[in-house]
Image (spheres, rainbow, N blue to C red):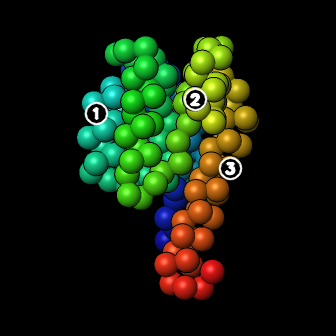
Amino acid sequence: MDFDFAKVLLVDDDPASRLTLKTVLELSGYTVDCAASAAEAVSKLDEQEYELVLSDLQMESPDAGLKVLAHARMMKYKPATALLTTEKNSEVKRTERVLIKPEDIPDLLGKVADLIGVRAMRRVNREMKLAGIA
């Protein structure tokens, strides 16, 4: 049987974090592409479709992750988005709906599944409206 696993773009400038999270996500059944910078992430977003974009908040600049997510939200295919951060910055919490702490693996996997599920439901609803069903 052939399955299409949800495709995730993981953006993190720290090689150890990137490898660890990629491994955890792949072992959980996701297909994962990685980017080490905001520029690389934007390029990948323009080339392929992703169900979810997970980005570290601080990379080459303090708000690089926010820029990645802003670009992702402009894509026609509308991926789900979330920030990976260990920061407790209240300003970020006000601007982003989902903050994921990578050290809490069960919570991370639960949020990833929820985000992909919500995105899938929105996509089905959008397609039904376009088809005049809903």
Name the residue located 38 percent from the left edge and 58 percent from the top edge.
Answer: 76
In front here: 28 or 108? 108
Residue 62: quadrant of the picture: top left
Name the residue located 73 percent from the left edge and 35 percent from the top edge.
Answer: 106
Which of marks 1 and 3 precedes in the sequence? 1
Which residue type carries mark 3?
Answer: Asp
Q: Secondary structure at mark 2?
A: helix
Q: Are marks 3 and 1 in contact (CB under 8 Å)?
A: no
Of tags 3 and 2, which is closer to the observer?
Answer: 2
To which residue does mark 3 refer? 114
Q: Are marks 3 and 2 in contact (CB under 8 Å)?
A: no
Which of marks 2 and 3 precedes in the sequence? 2
To which residue does mark 2 refer? 95
Which of marks 2 and 1 precedes in the sequence? 1
Which residue type carries mark 2?
Answer: Thr
Q: Residues within 10 Å of mark 3 (few under 14, many from 20)?
A: few
Q: Secondary structure at mark 3?
A: helix
Where is residue 100? Give x, y as percent: 63, 30
To which residue does mark 1 refer? 40
Where is residue 49? Give x, y as percent: 38, 55
Where is residue 71? Give x, y as percent: 37, 40
Q: Give the distance between the C-alpha atoms of the residues marked 3 and 1, in whole angstroms.
A: 26 Å
Q: Give the distance between the C-alpha atoms of the residues marked 1 and 2, in whole angstroms.
A: 23 Å
Where is residue 119? Give x, y as percent: 58, 57
Q: Is residue 117 above or below residue 133?
A: above
In front here: 63 or 36? 63
Which residue type carries mark 1?
Answer: Glu
Is residue 8 in view from this perspective? no
Q: Secondary structure at mark 1?
A: helix
